[in-house]
Image: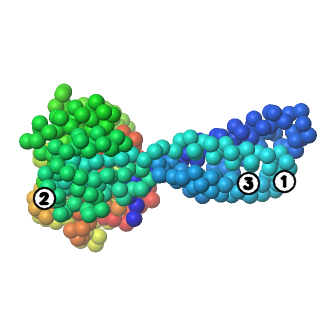
C-alpha cells in the first residue's frame, strides 16, 4: 500500500537522478576536453553535444529503472558502493548498445571504459557526501498523539529517526512495548544531560503542566535540542489538521481552504465575470435562438426552466436551465433517470451535450454560481443527503459551479445508490481543499472534451 510519503519519495528520487544525470554529462564533457589532443578524441563519430545528450538520456533511463534509495539517513558505505556499481553497470550496458548501434562512438574503447570508471568514483563520492546521520528522539507524554507520532517516526526507516523512549508520570500500557519508559517528565533534563546525542524532543503534556513544559523548552533551547509541542487533539479529532496564524494567535483548521483567501476569491470571481460575459455576448444568443425554435416546435411550455437550489452557505437561489423535459409536477423532487419518460428526444440531445446547462452562465454573472465548483443540488436532495452523508454540507463553503471536479471524474448524472452521492461529495471536498486557478482551467477543458465525445452518465 502506498503511504503518504510515496509522492515525497518519488520527487526526491527524481531530483537525485537528475543530479546524477548532470554529473554524468559534465564528466563526459570534461573527459572529452582533456583528451582533445590524444587519439581518444577521434573515437567520436557524431557531434560531441549529440553524444553527450545521448549518454545523459541513457543514464537517466537506467537510473530511474534501478531506483534510488541513497538519500536515506540510515545507509552504509558498502550499500552506497554496491548501488552505484549496479547503476553504473546497467548504464554502461545500455549506453554501449545505443552508442554502438547508433554509430555515435566506439563504446568499447579505453576512453569509454575510463569514463565509466571515473563515473563510478564520482557518483560514489556524491552519495557518500550527501548521506545524513541518524537523529535520536525522546517523547514526553504518552497520549494518543505521541503514540501515533512514534509509529510515524519508526515505520518509515529511511527518515533516520530513532526513538529512545518516552517520559510520563507513569508507564502507559497502551504505549508500544518496544519503546521503553524512561521516567517522569521531571527526569527529562537529567536524562538529556547524560545522553548528549538526543536531537529532538516531542512534548504532548497537557497545558496544566506549563511549568514543566517551560523548563523543558528553556533547557532544549540552551542545549541544542529541537523542542516540538504536539497538541492533544486525538480525543476529538482523528483527521489531519492544518496550522494557521491570525496575528500572533495560532489555530488549527480541519482542511486547507484556498478559496478563503481574498486574493483567490478575487481571481476566481474576475474569471467568472469575464468568462460568462464573453460567452453570453457571443455564442449564447445564437444557441438561445436555435434552442428556442426547436423547443417550441417539439414541446409546449417555456424555453427556460428554473429551480430553487442550495448555494454558498446553503443560501437558496434560482438555477436556470434550458427545459429538457415536458412540464411535470415532479421536477423539484425526482431526479432524471436514463430512460425518463418526461424527457423529449430534443431534451436528450441537450442533456447529452450539456447544452441545457448553458443558461447557468447567467447565474455566474449574477454571483450565485461559479464556472467551476460543486454542482448545486435540489432543496429536497440537500435536506435528505445532509442527514445521510457525513460532511455533506462542507460542499456549501464555496459557490456551486456549472461543472466540477466530481463531474469530470465520473460522478455526473443520476446517483442510483448512496455510495454514488458519497463519491460525489468526496470529490467536491477534494476540490475545495485543492483549489487552484490551474485546476479550474483543467476542469473546464475536461468538461468541453467530455461534451464533444459524449458522456454515458449525461442523461
Residue lying furthest left: 208
Q: Position of residue 425 (x, y in %)?
A: 24, 57
Instruction: Report if residue 311 is visible in the image.
Output: no
Which residue is identified by label 2? 386
Give the mark count: 3
Q: How far is mark 1 from mark 3, CA to CA?
A: 10 Å
Task: Say few, some or many: other residues with alpha carbon within 10 Å of mark 1 (under 14 / 14 to 19 / 20 or more).
Answer: few
Which residue is identified by label 1? 108
Mark 2 vs mark 1: give the one in front.
1
In this rendering, is residue 140 above or below 213? below
Q: Secondary structure at mark 1?
A: loop
Q: Residue at x 58, y 45 (%)?
A: 127
Q: Check residue 92 in the rendering and tell me which mark sits there, or answer none.
A: 3
Q: How far is mark 2 from mark 1, CA to CA?
A: 71 Å
Q: Position of residue 390 (x, y in %)?
A: 16, 59
**Counting residues from the N terminus, which is met first, the one under dot 1 or under dot 3?**
3
* Front position in the image: 415 or 88: 88
Residue lying furthest top: 247
Task: Kindly indicate the quadrant of the structure image that contains residue 349.
Answer: bottom left
Q: Is residue 329 left or right of residue 372?
A: left
Q: Quadrant of the N terminus?
A: bottom left
Tag 1 and tag 3, C-beta contact below 8 Å: no
Amino acid at each position: 500500500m502506498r503511504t503518504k510519503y510515496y509522492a515525497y519519495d518519488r520527487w526526491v528520487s527524481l531530483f537525485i537522478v537528475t543530479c546524477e544525470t548532470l554529473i554524468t554529462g559534465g564528466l563526459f564533457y570534461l573527459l572529452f576536453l582533456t583528451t582533445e589532443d590524444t587519439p581518444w578524441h577521434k573515437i567520436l563519430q557524431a557531434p560531441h553535444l549529440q553524444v553527450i545528450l545521448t549518454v545523459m538520456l541513457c543514464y537517466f533511463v537506467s537510473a530511474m529503472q534501478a531506483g534510488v534509495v541513497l538519500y536515506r539517513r540510515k545507509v552504509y558505505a558498502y550499500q552506497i558502493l554496491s548501488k552505484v556499481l549496479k547503476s553504473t553497470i546497467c548504464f554502461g550496458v545500455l549506453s554501449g548498445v545505443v552508442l554502438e548501434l547508433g554509430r555515435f562512438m566506439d563504446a568499447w574503447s579505453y576512453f569509454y571504459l575510463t569514463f565509466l570508471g571515473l563515473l563510478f568514483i564520482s557518483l560514489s563520492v556524491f552519495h557518500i557526501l550527501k548521506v545524513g546521520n541518524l537523529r535520536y528522539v525522546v517523547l514526553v507524554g504518552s497520549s494518543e498523539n505521541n503514540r501515533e507520532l512514534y509509529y510515524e517516526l519508526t515505520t518509515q526507516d529511511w527518515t533516520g529517526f530513532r526513538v529512545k523512549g518516552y517520559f510520563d508520570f507513569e508507564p502507559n500500557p497502551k504505549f508500544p512495548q518496544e519503546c521503553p519508559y524512561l521516567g517522569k517528565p521531571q527526569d527529562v533534563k537529567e536524562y538529556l544531560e547524560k545522553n548528549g546525542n538526543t536531537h529532538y524532543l516531542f512534548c504532548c503534556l497537557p497545558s496544566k503542566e506549563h511549568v514543566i513544559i517551560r523548563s523543558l523548552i528553556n533547557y532544549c533551547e540552551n542545549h541544542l535540542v529541537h523542542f516540538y509541542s504536539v497538541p492533544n487533539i486525538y480525543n476529538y479529532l482523528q483527521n489531519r489538521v492544518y496550522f494557521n496564524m491570525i496575528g500572533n494567535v495560532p489555530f488549527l483548521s480541519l482542511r486547507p481552504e484556498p478559496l478563503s483567501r481574498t486574493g483567490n476569491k478575487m481571481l476566481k470571481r474576475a474569471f467568472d465575470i469575464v468568462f460568462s460575459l464573453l460567452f453570453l455576448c457571443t455564442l449564447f444568443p445564437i444557441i438561445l435562438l436555435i434552442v428556442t425554435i426547436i423547443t417550441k416546435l417539439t414541446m409546449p411550455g417555456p424555453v427556460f426552466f428554473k429551480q430553487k437550489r442550495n448555494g454558498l452557505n446553503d443560501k437558496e437561489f434560482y438555477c436556470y436551465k434550458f427545459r429538457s423535459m415536458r412540464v411535470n409536477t415532479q421536477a423539484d423532487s425526482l431526479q432524471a433517470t436514463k430512460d425518463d419518460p418526461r424527457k423529449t428526444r430534443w431534451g436528450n440531445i441537450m442533456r447529452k451535450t450539456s447544452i441545457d446547462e448553458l443558461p447557468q452562465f447567467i447565474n455566474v454573472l449574477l454571483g450565485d454560481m461559479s464556472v467551476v465548483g460543486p454542482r448545486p443540488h435540489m432543496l429536497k436532495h440537500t435536506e435528505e443527503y445532509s442527514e445521510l452523508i457525513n460532511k455533506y454540507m462542507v460542499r456549501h463553503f464555496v459557490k456551486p459551479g456549472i461543472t466540477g471536479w466530481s463531474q469530470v471524474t465520473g460522478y455526473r448524472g443520476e446517483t442510483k445508490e448512496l455510495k454514488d452521492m458519497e463519491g460525489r461529495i468526496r470529490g467536491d471536498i477534494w476540490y475545495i481543499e485543492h483549489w487552484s486557478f490551474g485546476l479550474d482551467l483543467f476542469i473546464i477543458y475536461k468538461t468541453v472534451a467530455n461534451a464533444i465525445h459524449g458522456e454515458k452518465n449525461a442523461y
